[in-house]
Image (cartoon, grey):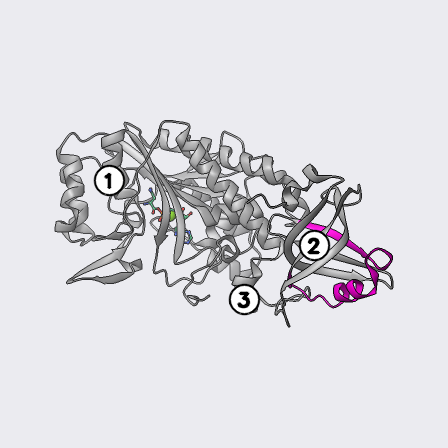
Amino acid sequence: MNDVTIARIAQHEGQTVTLKGWLYNMRSSKKLHFLQLRDGTGIIQAVVSLADVGQALFELAGSLTQETSLTLTGKVVADPRSHIGFEMQISDIAILGRSVDYPISPKAHGDAFLMDHRHLWLRSKRQQTIMRIRHTLVRAIRDYFDDRDYVLIDSPILTPNACEGTSTLFSTKYFDDQAFLSQSGQLYQEAGATAFRKTYCFGPTFRAEKSKTRRHLTEFWMVEPEVAFMDLEGDMDLAEDFLCYVVARALEKHEKELVEILERDVEPLRRVQKPFPRISYDKAIEEIKAIQLETVDKELRDLLEISWGMDFGSPHETELTKRHDRPIIVHGFPSQIKAFYMKREDHNPLVSRSMDVLAPEGYGEVIGGGQREDNLEVLEAAIAEHKLPRDAFEWFLDLRRYGTVTHAGFGMGLERCVAWVCGLHHVRETIPFARTMDRLRP
Ligand code: 4AD
Ligand code: MG
């Protein structure tokens, strides 16, 4: 198959070609129709002139409706006014499939309506841009680890145990047993790191989060590197270097679309440069308290209430990150609010060797990770303390029984990263078909 596509139309300047696609939009005058043809790779303006095509074809063009599938034959001509540099002068049109009363018109629609029609909404210019940026980020993420000797070790999705706490587990019958959809591939990456030193996984993860915030999906994609002989400091260095790399790749490839289609100010993305400020949890609590004191809005002031031992909520992260012009790393969270596998500080077990990377402009947590508990007895105690079923973790304890080493890693939620890079308010637009508490369709 060697179809001509709009993305590669420059190769056909001066030639008469046939394009296959859908009608995106049209405007007309008495003797001219200007069709916007969308072929999945781009949009091109196709000019139908009454003088060139005759009455019958001109009328056919005029009767075309939004999202009708068709072939257009015509000459490719350079046009400096065009956003792609070319337009077509049409000599023939053939309809493939009609589209009657396409539900998404160019006028504004509500979020719920658009999400209900997600299978069609994906055809819009804005959604096309977001999905392409997501794709670029996926490639950048893979390239980053592939180019640095990491081995891809896919973690299973059906698992016998919890990773991130038992309250957000989706469970499913597994023959005569029970299984859970993976909340994180981390535990298996720890086995990977002791076998291959540096590994990563990148796949869908699931959280039955009873949370309707703009940052929560029940199914999301997470990339998780894990490295043997790396401690918390090394983990923070890795997260920082990695994030700079992926954001730079997205900016390099998509700056024009970010500005023109998503209307995103790209200056904050340019500032995603090392070093990121590293702030201890204790210091972050002080900063949040100071912000709270200065906050005039009573409702926000109440939301910012915090004391040592509490986890950050969205408002805390949002206000804290607004104070910084680049991502920040908060480290040393209380052990009590972190997962059972987090390494505790030798001098103070109340504090864990954990870290979160918070994106600026109010986006908040995009990365969570830290150093893992490598001491068998401490880990056994943590499993008991979290009331986790010991038998499901025996294999995990083996990693401490047979040649335990310092190791660390993190997870980055792809959708949070896409939302931030694209400047989107809500993660629902960052994934082709979002799954949230109240949405399983389409
Ligand atoms: O902070 P979390 O829960 O960390 C872990 O799962 C670790 N086991 C990862 C690791 O160390 N290998 O999740 C990691 C990231 C978050 O920072 C966030 O970006 C994303 O996953 N995330 C979500 N994204 C969308 N919807 C949700 N419900 C998310 N929960 C977490
Ligand atoms: Mg987290």
Q: Nearer the viewer, residue 294 or 109?
A: 109
The secondary structure type at the circle numbered 3 is loop
Q: Nearer the viewer, residue 137 or 232?
A: 137
Q: Which residue is mark 3?
A: 117
Upstream in sequence: badge 2 or badge 3? 2
Q: Which residue is mark 2?
A: 72
Upstream in sequence: badge 2 or badge 1? 2
Q: Disc 2 or disc 1, which is closer to the eye?
A: 2
Q: Disc 2 or disc 3, which is closer to the eye?
A: 2
Quarter of image, res 48: bottom right
Spatial CA distance of label 2 from label 3 is 27 Å
Upstream in sequence: badge 1 or badge 3? 3
Q: Which residue is mark 1?
A: 349
Label 2 packing within 10 angstroms: few (<14), some (14-19), many (20+)? many
Q: Nearer the viewer, residue 315 or 440?
A: 440
How far across and down, in percent of the image, does residue 81 sit? Answer: 80, 44
How far across and down, in percent of the image, does residue 193 sit? Answer: 27, 33
- The residue depicted at 50 percent of the width and 32 percent of the height is 245
| Range covered by the magenta-colored residues | 43-69
What's under tag 3, amino acid-wise?
His
The secondary structure type at the circle numbered 2 is strand
Label 1 packing within 10 angstroms: few (<14), some (14-19), many (20+)? few
- The residue depicted at 75 percent of the width and 53 percent of the height is 46
